Image (cartoon, helix red, strand yellow):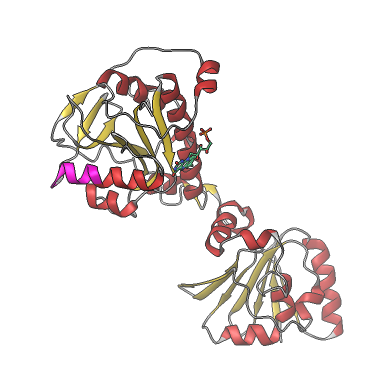
Amino acid sequence: MNWILHDPATRKKMRLGTNPSSRLAWKVWEESWKARAVTASLKGKGIEIRWVGAVSSEFFLKKSKSTEPWSRFVEIRPNARGFSIRTGLSNAQIQIRNLNDLVFLRSNLGGLLDALGFLKKPKEDQELRYWEEADLGFHRQSLEFERGPWGGTYRMGRPKPKASRNPRPEMRILLGSKKTGSLSSVIQKRASNRNFSHKAVSIQKLSRFLNQCFGIQGKKRPFASGGGIYEQQLYLAIADHPSIPPGFYRVNSGQSCLEKWKTENDSKLVLAWQQVALQNLAPSKVAPPIVGILTSRHALLAIKYERIAYRLSLLNAGCFLQAAALSAADLRLAFCPLGSVNPSLFEKTTKIKMMEESPVAAFALGEVGSN
Ligand SMILES: Cc1cc2nc3c(=O)[nH]c(=O)nc-3n(C[C@H](O)[C@H](O)[C@H](O)COP(=O)(O)O)c2cc1C
C-alpha cells in the first residue's frame, strides 16, 4: 500500500510505503507534525484520513488484532466525493469513494481505525455509556475546532436578517411597564412554581414580565445572546383572559405589543399548548393560563457560526429562561420552565417550517394558585 501524506501548512507531500525505510521517514515526518492536521490519502483508492494529534506511525502501518466491529459513535454521511466517516470519539475524518471501501478499511487498517476511535472497545468506558450517539456527535461537532472552519466564518455572506414575519397581524395589544425590586431578593424568591391560579395575569404585569426578560422597551435586551444576533422569537399561547382574546401571540419587542397569529381555531390551539405544558408539569392540576414558546431562527445564527450555531441557540435559550424565571419571581408570578417543546405543534400553529424556525425553550406562566 502506498500512502501519500499531505502537510496542509507547507503543502509538502510525502509517499509512505510499507518498507522499513519509509517507516523511518514517516517517523521523522510525524515528529515535525506534532499537533498539526495529518491528511493521509491512499493512492488510487481515493481514501483520505485526516486527524489532528500524535498518532504513532505504528498505528498507521500495524494490522489490528481487534476483532471488534465499528463503534456505535461512527457516523457515515454521503457527500460530493462519496462518503465521509466520522466518530464521536476523536477529531478524525475518513473520506471514501464507495461503501465497499469500509470492508477494505476494516481489514487493512484496523490498527489506525482503533487508535482513532472508529472501532468498538471490548468494554465501553463508564462515562461513555451515558452518551447518546447523536449527542456526542453533536457535542464534538460543535466543539472540535480541528475539524475545519469554525465559529463566525460568515461562509454564506452577510445577508440582512429578515424582518418580522407576521406583517399583517390580526390585532395588536399594546404593552408598557414600570421598574421593580432588587436583584438579590428576587434571586432568593425564584423557584419553579407549578401551582397556577385560574386568575388571569393583567396586561400590565405581563408587560413588566416581558420587558424584564425579553425586552419590549428600548433596544437593550435583558439577556445575553451569542454574537448579539438575537435569533429568538417569543410566542405566548394565552387562555381565559378578560381583555386578551384566546390565541397564539408573537411578542413584538420593537413595537412593544403582542401580535395575534391568525389560526383556524384559536381556543383549540391554546388548549393543545396547555396540554403540552400539563404533560410536562405533573402533578399540576390547573393548566397554566399562559404558555411561552421561545423559538430560534436557526439560519440567523448559522449564517455566521459554523457548527456552533445549534449549541449557541441552546445556550441562548438558557440565558433567556433564567431571565424569565427571575422576572416572574420579581413579579410573584408562577413560572416553570418546560423541558420538552413541541416543534410540530409550533409548525401546525404558525405554518412556519421547522427547519426555518423552531422552539428551543418553553415555560408555563400564571398567577400563583391557592393550593
Ligand atoms: C431547562 C429546564 C427544563 C425544565 N423542565 C421542566 C419540566 O418540563 N417540568 C417541570 O415540572 N419542571 C421543569 N423544570 C424545572 C426544574 O425541575 C427545576 O428548576 C428544578 O427542580 C429546581 O427547582 P427550582 O427551579 O424551584 O429551584 C425545568 C428546568 C429547566 C432549567
Q: Residue at x 18, y 37 (%)?
A: 167
Instruction: Answer with the quarter of the image where residue 60 lies.
Output: bottom right
Please tell me whether the stretch drawn in magenta is mainly helix, strand or loop: helix
Instruction: Answer with the quarter of the image where residue 72 lies.
Output: bottom right
Image quarter hosting the C terminus: top left
Question: Is 177 positioned to the left or the right of 307 in the image?
Answer: left
Query: Is residue 266 one of those drawn in magenta?
Result: yes
Image quarter hosting the N terminus: bottom right
From the top left corner, tell me how far across and down residue 279 is, in percent.
Answer: 37, 48
- Tally the numbered discs: 0
From the top left corner, tell me how far across and down residue 22 is, in percent.
Answer: 82, 80
Residue furthest to the front in view is 371
Instruction: Answer with the quarter of the image where residue 46 lies.
Output: bottom right
Q: Residue at x 41, y 31 (%)?
A: 335
Pick the front one: 323 or 12: 323
Residue 64 drawn above or below residue 323: below
The answer to whether residue 166 is visible is yes
From the top left corner, tell me how far across and down residue 345 is, in percent.
Answer: 28, 51
Q: Magenta segment, which residues?
A: 264-271
From the top left corner, tell me how far across and down residue 176 is, in percent.
Answer: 28, 17
Q: Residue at x 19, y 39 (%)?
A: 261
Pick the front one: 148 or 9: 148
Residue 269 drawn above or below residue 195: below
Pick the front one: 99 or 210: 210
The answer to whether residue 14 is visible is no
Question: Is 256 positioned to the left or the right of 309 in the image?
Answer: left
Query: Is residue 53 one of those drawn in magenta?
Result: no
Residue 206 drawn above or below residue 169: above
Question: Is 163 positioned to the left or the right of 262 in the image?
Answer: right
